[in-house]
Image (cartoon, rainbow, N blue to C red):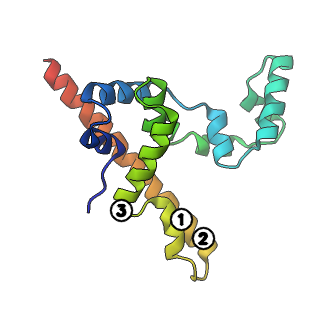
Amino acid sequence: MSEKFFGQFLLERGVIRRDGLLDALEHQAAIPIPICALVLDRGLLTERQIEELDSERVRSARKPLEIAIRGRMLTFQQLEEATQNPAERRLFLAEALMRRGWLSLAQARRLLREHRQECPPHVSDLDALFQNMEQREVIVPFVRTTAELFLRYARQVLKVLSAAVKARRAR
C-alpha cells in the first residue's frame, strides 16, 4: 500500500471538500512556525529558558534569540541549523484545518489516529524495528530524521505542484 497523505485521506472519507483542503493548504503555507518553537522542538532550549528570554525581551527590547546567543544559551550555528529547512517552519495540515474551522480538535485527533492505522508504518514506528540493534542511539535518530525530511520534502513538492495546477487552472 502506498502512502496516503492526510489531505487525500480526508477527501476520500468525505470529511472535507476540495475547497476546504485548498483553503487549509494556503493557510498552512502562509503561516510560519515561530523560530522559538523550532528551537524548543530540537531541544536546544527548554520552555523555562524561552520564558526567561521572553521576560528579558520585555525588559531589553531585544529579540529573544538574540538574547540567547549573546547569553551563550544558544550558538549562531545552532540557530542557523534549526531554521535551515523552510519546510519545517510550516504548520501541520491538521492544525491548519482546525485554525480555519474545517475540523475540531476531537475530529482531528480521531482522524489522525485512523489515518495512521490505515497507512503504512509511520516514522514513529521505526523504533520497533531497531529495538535489539547495537548503536541504536545513532541509527534510530538518523533513520527517523531522514524519513521526516523525506516526508517534508514530499509535502513541499506537492504544494508546488498544487500551486502550479491552481495557476494553470486560473489561466
Secondary structure found at label 3: loop
Does 70 appear above or below 169? below
Q: CA distance from mark 2 to mark 3?
A: 24 Å
Residue type at numbered disc 1 = Phe
Report if the CB atoms under discs 2 and 1 are less than 8 Å apart: yes
Residue type (three-letter) at the residue carrying disc 3: Pro
Q: The N terminus appears in which quarter of the rendering?
A: bottom left
On residue 138, the disc is: 2
Above or below 164: residue 149: below
Horizontal and vertical percent for residue 143?
Answer: 49, 65
Q: In the rendered view, would you say 121 is above or below 64?
A: below
Q: Which residue is mark 1?
A: 142
Say which label, 3 or 1, has the lower sequence index. 3
Which quadrant is home to the C terminus?
Answer: top left
Viewer-closest of 143 and 84: 143
Name the image quarter holding residue 75. top right
Circle 2 or circle 3, nearest the eye? 3
State the CA–CA distance, disc 3 to disc 1: 20 Å
Question: In whole angstroms, how far apart are the C-alphas of marks 2 and 1?
Answer: 6 Å
Q: Amino acid at mark 2?
A: Val
Mark 2 residue element: helix
First in sequence, mark 2 or 3: give its number: 3
Name the residue located 57 percent from the left edge and 78 percent from the top edge: 131
Q: Is residue 150 visible?
A: no
Say what secondary structure mark 1 lies in.
helix
x 27%, y 24%: residue: 19
